[in-house]
Amino acid sequence: MSTAYGPQELARDLQRLVDLPARTKAELKAWYAEAREVQERILASEELHTIPHSLWHFFSDADVRARSPEDREGQFEQVRQHIAVLATGAIPPDDSREVDFGTFLRELWSFIRGKDR
């Protein structure tokens, strides 16, 4: 029997990836192997039909982050925001489209209300 893989599990895995070192060639190789496993779990999940576009970039940009502290910090901040939302059981809105904060809160509230029913 397989275990469900949903937002909270993804939050845990993303935090692990954020915490993993990824600066040397060996570290980058290990990081990408971990990231591939997380991506496979996402694709096999029945709960994670859509995740923010920026997370797919996160999975593929470890080498960029290793070269650029500015890119690393900016991307990690965005991923930490996604982790905070995922930890609640919600899925952050797709950030490939512009979403203002009010829309985000309405979508989050709608999701929360839907779980209570």
Image (cartoon, rainbow, N blue to C red):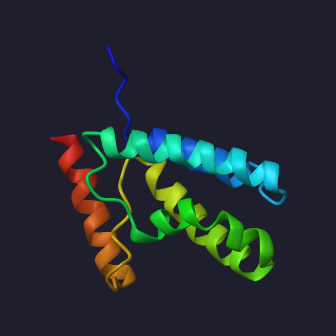
State the image quarter where residue 53 is shown.
bottom left
Q: Is residue 25 left or right of residue 108?
A: right
Residue nearer the viewer, 63 or 71:
63
- Residue at horizontal 39 percent and vertical 66 percent from the top: 52
Residue nearer the viewer, 4 or 33:
33
Q: Is residue 39 above or below residue 92?
A: above
Give coordinates of residue 110: x percent, y percent: 22, 60
Q: Is residue 75 above or below residue 41?
A: below
State the image quarter where residue 70 is shown.
bottom right
Give coordinates of residue 66: x percent, y percent: 77, 68
Q: Is residue 35 left or right of residue 9?
A: right
Residue nearer the viewer, 69 or 31:
31
Q: Is residue 5 above or below residue 17?
A: above
**How many badges with numbers are in the image?**
0
Give coordinates of residue 38: x percent, y percent: 49, 43
- Residue at horizontal 66 percent and vertical 78 percent from the top: 74
Give coordinates of residue 11: x percent, y percent: 52, 47
Residue nearer the viewer, 40 or 91:
40
- Residue at horizontal 74 percent and vertical 48 percent from the top: 20
The residue sitting at the right extreme is 24
- Residue at horizontal 24 percent and vertical 39 percent from the top: 46
| Quadrant the C terminus occupies | top left
| Quadrant the N terminus occupies | top left
The residue sitting at the top extreme is 1
Q: Is residue 68 left or right of residue 6?
A: right
